[in-house]
Image (tube, helix red, strand yellow):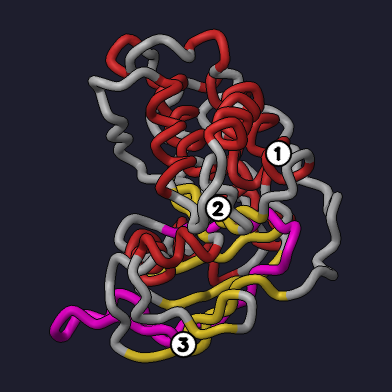
Amino acid sequence: MKSRTNGEGLRDKVAGANPAPVTIAPMTQPATGATLLEARDLSKHFGGLRAVASISFRVRQGEIVGVIGPNGAGKTTLFALLSGFLPATSGEVLFEDAPILGLRPDTLCHLGMARTFQVVRPFPEMTVFENVKAAAVFGKQGRRSNQEILSDVEEVLRATGLAPLAGQHPPSLSLPQRKRLEVARALATRPKLLLLDEVLAGLNPKEIQEALPFIRSLNEKHRVTILMIEHNLRAIMGVCQRILVLNFGQLIFDGAPSDAVEDARVIEAYLGGQQHA
């Protein structure tokens, strides 16, 4: 039997148990915009553990950039550093060329960086509309009229497909709907950069397929730059224009999805460098 290359093995991992053609996202928005977010030699140590080790990368305006890697690679720690939930051991993070390390999450939100969480926790006693309104009121600095706030909330509900559910309470929503509510609350802060933390986690294949155009629409129609963590390789490689691959806290790849599945370091991280018969 003809042996298979490691690259083919990783492509099968991307395709899943029932292989289907893997669509690699076209570069619909070339990375020519100004740098929105930049990490320089960013590190986080927990005692002797280097969870994030001297990572440097840039995210340009208009991009959808994915962050992938095996369990324990440092993805969630990286997001916590970028969004102000953890202090860095060393390094720099710039947002629109201004240093932001040490700033609180609410301050970063006011500056235009919003994030979602893998485990969604909306206010259960408030309706969908009220959850999004709370984010619109407190997620941005400056005084706005009630009419402006209501207009923003209605726009976000339409954009996320939640308008028909505006009067319902979160416990009555399905998981995909609660995930969209999490994104809606982040969108209501009018972010320039949206950090999506496993927004597809827990969804079935059909729900994931329906969510991908939604993520693209946030970027293309609403002009939101996106940095997203995802374990579903097939999904993230089908929606992202560029991906960052982490392994043991180090950035081992930064480039196009089509190149990642052929990269020796990425193959080693996911398959252990073994060939498959």
Q: Return the disc, 1 or 2, that comes first in the chain's sequence.
A: 2
Q: CA distance from mark 2 to mark 3?
A: 19 Å
Element assignment for label 3: strand
Q: Identify the amino acid type marked 1.
A: Arg
Q: Main secondary structure of the magenta part?
A: strand
Residue span colored magenta: 42-69
Q: Looking at the rendered structure, which numbered label has been put on residue 206? A: none
Give the x, y percent position of residue 113.
52, 60
Compared to residue 30, the image places residue 23 above or below, namely: above
Element assignment for label 1: helix
Element assignment for label 2: strand
Q: Is residue 151 magenta?
A: no
Q: Looking at the rendered structure, which numbered label has been put on residue 216? A: 1
Front residue of 260 and 135: 135
**Which of the 4 image quadrants contains residue 35?**
bottom right
Residue under numbered circle 3: 92
